[in-house]
Every structure is written in C-alpha cells, then in structure tokens.
Image: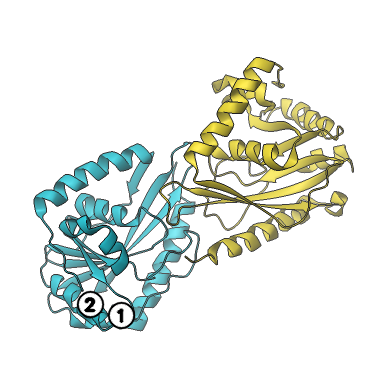
Chain colours: A yellow, B cyan
C-alpha cells in the first residue's frame, strides 16, 4: 500500500493548482446541502465516480465546506501514474489482493481522528454520469464496521450541466447521515445512497431556463 | 420573421473554425454510427441543454449527415447575433403570428433534399439529465407542410467525462421515419423511446 506523504511545499503548490484548475474549467461549482454538516467528527465521504474531476471537485468541497484533512482512496496504478496525488492525501488500494485489507484498515484508522475526512468512490471504477443504478463494491462495509461510530457519513452526488454557459457547471448535492450504524449491510447502505442519488437527479432535471 | 441568407463558403469556413474550436474544448466529439436516407432532406430534432447545441448540430450536419444546415433561432438571439444568418440561421418568434411564417419557411427549406433544418423541439433550455423530451405543437404544423421527401432524425447529445479532464460529447442519432408517414403522437413517442435508448447506450458506452 502506498500511504500519503508529507511535503509542505508540494502540498502548497498543488493546493493552489487544484483550486485554480477547478475555477478555470468550470463556470461554477454549485454546492447544495440538504442538512447541516457537524464538525466534531471525522467524515467519510462517498461520491459517484464519472470523471477525473471527481477527486478535484471533492477537494474543492472539502476546502469550501468541510475544512478537514483531505484523504482519498485511489487505485494503485493511478497513484503510480500521477505522483503528486500522494502528497495531497491519497493512499492506494489494490483490488483483488491481500494488500486491500491493509488499505481498508488504514482508511478505518483515519476515521478515528475527527480532523480527517476520507473520500471513497464506492463504485470502484468510472461510470457514465447518466447511470441510473449505482453499484457499490464490497470493501466499504469493512471500513464502516471497523471504524465504529467515530465518524459521520456524507453522501455526494455530482451532475455536470452546461445550460447557457460555454463552460460546464458541476452540481454537487451533499447529504449528511448521522448515526451511521443504522446501515447494517451493504444493501441498506447502497439503497440509502441510491435514494439520495435519485432524488437529487430528479431535482437536477427539474431545472428549466 | 427574418429569413436566412445562408452562404456555402462562409458556412464551410465557419464549420472549419468551429471544428478546430470544439476539438480544443472537448476531448472527443463522438458521433455514433448513423446513415441518413439518401435523397431525403433532414429535419433534425435535437435536445437543448447547453450553449454548444447549435454548434453540435452544425458539426453533425457537415460531418455525418452531409446536408446544408439551417437552424431555427429564437428571435432575440437572432437579432443579437445577426451574423448567424449567413451560416443558416433564421428567426422564430414564439407565440406570435410570425411563428407560422417561420414554420412554413422551414417546411419550404425541407423540400430541397440537400438541406437540413435543425430545431430544438423543447423550445427552452433543459437539463442534460432529463428523461422526457417535450415536443412543442409547432412541429406538427411544420411537418404537415413539408412536400418533398424528408427524413426526421432525433439527435441526442450527452456530455460525459470518463478518463479525461475535458468533456466528451456523444451524439446519438435515430431515424424517426419520413415526414407525412408518422402521426404526430407516434413521433412524440418515438423521440422519447429513442431518448431512453440513447441514455441506455450512453451508460454502456466503451471508454
């Protein structure tokens, strides 16, 4: 497993860079919260994965809204390709290997510190932004049971839209779930995320200009 | 109603410029395989979700459908962007008597099998994620007035990203039949079925 590295200069540079490219490539990043986000616990952020931007957009969400220490679970091959990710809080996961357990444990460990947030794309790979059914991979439940009640769950559903602008607008819909042990199984958790995804997609389609 | 003063040379130059500009702004403009009927003009119904839509229609008309593009534009936009009239745009004033004029003007253009008229049947900007395409009644009136052979094509453009930072535009084309042979209710149904089909194809698209 590749764990995050510390380098204040590299972090400072890419922090500026990420915020700059998000601002340059999007007309707006619109954040919509359905409930207030409590600040006394670590946050496990689950987001849909449809582009390279997802990680950067969530970095932006964290910067604007959550103000936590950013961590993200990324495929090992990607982290090897883009070497600066590990300085921005990325740690690797290798599907179908023993190493995966170490990554899941590491993520659970991070959630014990209320200063942290961990971003996971539970879909495990890139899908279209137009999917109706969100499928989660199994490992996520291990993190949730191992980390017990020390964190809040946060769902994010992102939809990209142009409307009358040349540049796209990213619409990020956020929903906090408190009392996360309510989800005893993967199916319940997936169903809860699916419900958030469906209702926000509905909201998104109702916009008419 | 203000008619088009389409000019082939200017249109071609504009297409070349737009192709360069779009390829700069998009990672890929992917037109799914589609063959238009030979000897037919094309009424292109397309979803309206962005600033780019007219240019997408232009791109498809030149690149894939091989017809001369005409496009219906809202009157105020037409006045603001007067130069589009040389590139095939003509105006349309909603809810006025002039609207009927624009409709018969479009029908007239469609009598020539070399032409293509692009129309946004929704009449307003909607989300790219919608599942239902509303079609304004004017389309029925327009189709009734077409005399020459004309194929109705639905174009669904969807924006996706996948492994790139720049967006990718995917264009799905569907044949909705020949004008005069499809009742309006049936046409509405077909467009919506095809829209669902496009969304399904998009989810399963290779990337």
Which residue is at a point 64% across and 57% down the rendered structure image? A197
Front residue (pair B166, A8): A8
Q: Chain of mark 2?
A: B
Which residue is at a point 43% across and 63% down the rendered structure image? B197
Mark 2 or mark 1, which has the lower sequence index? 2
Location of residue A64 (image quadrant): top right
Say left or right for B71 vs A152: left
- Residue most toward the right? A149
Which residue is at a point 33% across and 52% down the rendered structure image? B32
Quarter the C terminus of chain B occupies: top left
Front residue (pair B97, B51): B97
Give percent across and percent down for residue B101.
Answer: 20, 79
Which residue is at a point 16% across and 51% down the rendered structure image? B11
Say left or right for B182 vs A95: left
Q: Which residue is mark 1?
A: B138
The correct choice, above or below, for A77 with respect to B114 in the image is above
Location of residue A4 (image quadrant): top right
The correct choice, above or below, for B11 with respect to A84 in the image is below
Spatial separation of the CA atoms under disc 2 and disc 1: 7 Å
Front residue (pair B196, B134): B134
Mark 1 closeness class: few <14, some 14–19, many ≥20 residues within 10 Å: some
Give percent across and percent down for residue B188.
Answer: 37, 77
The correct choice, above or below, for A184 with respect to A9 in the image is below
Location of residue B94 (image quadrant): bottom left
Disc 2 secondary structure class: helix
Q: Look at the numbered discs 2 and 1 and tell me whether their residues touch, using CB distance below 8 Å.
A: yes
The correct choice, above or below, for A183 with respect to B145 in the image is above
Can residue A139 be seen in the rendering of this structure? Answer: no
Q: Which residue is mark 2?
A: B103
Give percent across and percent down for residue A110.
Answer: 81, 31
């Amino acid at each position: 497993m590749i764990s995050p590295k510390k380098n204040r200069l590299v972090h400072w540079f890419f922090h500026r860079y990420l915020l700059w490219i998000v601002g340059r490539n999007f007309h707006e990043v619109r954040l919509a919260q359905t409930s207030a986000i409590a600040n006394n616990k670590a946050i496990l952020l689950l987001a849909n994965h449809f582009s390279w931007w997802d990680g950067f957009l969530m970095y932006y969400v964290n910067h604007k809204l959550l103000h936590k220490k950013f961590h993200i679970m990324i495929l090992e091959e990607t982290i090897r390709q883009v070497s600066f990710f590990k300085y921005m809080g990325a740690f690797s996961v290798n599907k179908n290997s023993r190493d995966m357990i170490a990554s899941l444990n590491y993520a659970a460990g991070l959630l014990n510190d209320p200063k942290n947030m961990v971003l996971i794309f539970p879909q495990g790979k890139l899908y279209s932004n137009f999917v109706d059914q969100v499928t989660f991979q199994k490992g996520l439940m291990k993190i949730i049971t191992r980390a017990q009640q020390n964190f809040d769950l946060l769902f994010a559903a992102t939809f990209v839209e142009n409307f009358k602008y040349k540049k796209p607008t990213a619409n990020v819909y956020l929903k906090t779930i408190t009392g996360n042990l309510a989800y005893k199984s993967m199916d319940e958790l997936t169903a809860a995320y699916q419900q958030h995804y469906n209702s926000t997609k509905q909201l998104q389609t109702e916009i008419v200009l | 109603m203000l008619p088009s003063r389409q000019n082939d040379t200017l249109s071609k130059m504009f297409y070349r410029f737009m192709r360069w500009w779009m390829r700069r702004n998009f990672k890929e403009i992917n037109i799914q395989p589609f063959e238009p009927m030979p000897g037919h003009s094309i009424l292109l119904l397309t979803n309206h979700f962005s600033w780019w839509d007219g240019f997408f229609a232009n791109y498809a008309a030149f690149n894939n459908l091989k017809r001369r593009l005409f496009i219906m534009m809202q009157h105020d936009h037409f006045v603001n962007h007067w130069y589009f009239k040389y590139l095939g745009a003509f105006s349309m004033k909603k809810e006025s008597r002039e609207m009927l004029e624009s409709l018969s003007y479009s029908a007239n253009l469609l009598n020539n099998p070399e032409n293509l008229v692009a129309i946004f049947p929704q009449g307003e900007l909607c989300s790219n994620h919608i599942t239902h395409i509303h079609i304004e009644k004017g389309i029925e009136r327009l189709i009734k007035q077409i005399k020459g052979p004309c194929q109705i094509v639905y174009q669904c453009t969807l924006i996706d990203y996948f492994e790139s930072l720049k967006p990718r535009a995917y264009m799905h084309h569907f044949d909705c039949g020949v004008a005069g042979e499809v009742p309006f209710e049936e046409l509405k149904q077909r467009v919506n079925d095809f829209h669902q089909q496009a969304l399904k194809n998009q989810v399963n698209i290779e990337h």
